[in-house]
């Protein structure tokens, strides 16, 4: 039995801040001072189709550093559209990421959301779904894929919002 997912709300709130940082960078504010350090916010991929998300997920899982995080070659993950527009989620039994594709769900059709769901796929711990092990794995995955600046922004923002690493 897994422990209660008490950190979920805090993590989602902190992720909202991180998403705003990346949205602002895409709009031209790509220099950010966080934790007393000025960083260039890396570009974040955005997606228009399930097929483009599938190609992205396949390429991430094929990366050497991601295989190291997974302790070997990670198994494949299927990406599918889901109904509704309020959440993306990972289905462990089916190794599937479900992403809303409605026009009011553009928030979910982004790299950080896919990495969050992929972190669930790579998380083999028995702790809470959004606990410390998951958060560490998520940040490590973002670092391997998006670079150290993305991970730094996430670490500082998460810590400032009460998410334990």
Image (cartoon, helix red, strand yellow):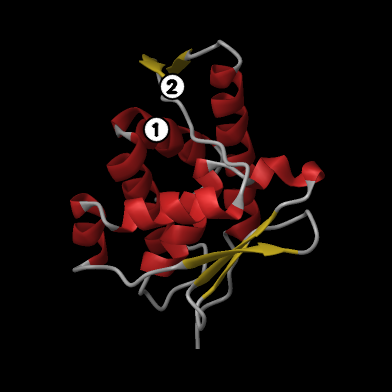
160, 22: nearer the viewer: 22
State the mark number for residue 41.
Answer: 2
Left or right of 157, for residue 72: left
* Residue in the picture at 39% in, 16% down: 40
Mark 1 to mark 2: distance in Å?
A: 7 Å
Sort mark 2 into few (<14), some (14-19) or many (20+) by Cα contacts within 10 Å: many
Q: Position of residue 119 (x, y in %)?
A: 42, 59
Number of dots carrying numbers: 2
Question: Would you identify the image quadrant in which residue 143 lies?
Answer: top left
Q: For this rendering, which residue is in front, 2 or 139? A: 139
Provide residue 130's location: percent of width, then percent of height.
52, 62
- For marks 1 and 2, the one nearer the N-term is 2
Element on which disc 1 rests: helix
Q: Are marks 1 and 2 in contact (CB under 8 Å)?
A: yes
Q: Residue at x 48, y 56 (%)?
A: 54
**Residue 121 locus on image (x, y percent):** 42, 68
Q: Residue at label 1?
A: 150
35 on left or right of 48: left
Identify the residue at image location x=56%, y=36%: 46
Considering depth in this image, is 65 or 14 the residue closer to the camera?
A: 65
In the rendered view, tell whether residue 82 sits above or below residue 56: below
Q: Residue 130 got which mark?
A: none
In the image: residue 85, left or right of residue 152: right
> Residue 98's x, y, as percent?
62, 64
Secondary element at tag 2: loop
Residue at the bottom extreme? Answer: 1
Task: Judge whether 37 appears above or below 78 on screen.
Answer: above
Looking at the image, which residue is at 68% across and 41% down? 107
How many C-alpha atoms fall within 10 Å of the one at disc 1: few (<14), some, or many (≥20)? many
| Residue in the foreground of this view, choosing between 121 and 101 | 101
């Amino acid at each position: 039995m897994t422990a209660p997912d008490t950190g979920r709300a805090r993590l989602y709130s902190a992720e909202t801040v991180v998403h705003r940082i990346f949205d602002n960078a895409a709009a031209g504010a790509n220099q950010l001072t966080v934790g007393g350090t000025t960083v260039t916010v890396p570009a974040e991929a955005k997606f228009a189709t399930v097929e483009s998300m599938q190609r992205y997920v396949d390429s991430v899982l094929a990366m050497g550093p991601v295989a190291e995080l997974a302790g070997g070659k990670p198994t494949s993950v299927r990406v599918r559209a889901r109904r509704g527009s309020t959440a993306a989620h990972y289905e462990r039994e089916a190794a599937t990421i479900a992403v809303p594709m409605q026009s009011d769900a553009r928030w979910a059709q982004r790299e950080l959301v896919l990495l969050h769901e992929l972190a669930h796929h790579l998380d083999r711990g028995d702790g809470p779904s959004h606990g410390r092990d998951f958060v560490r794995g998520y940040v490590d995955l973002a670092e391997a894929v998006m670079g150290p600046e993305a991970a730094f922004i996430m670490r500082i923002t998460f810590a400032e919002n009460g998410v334990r690493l």
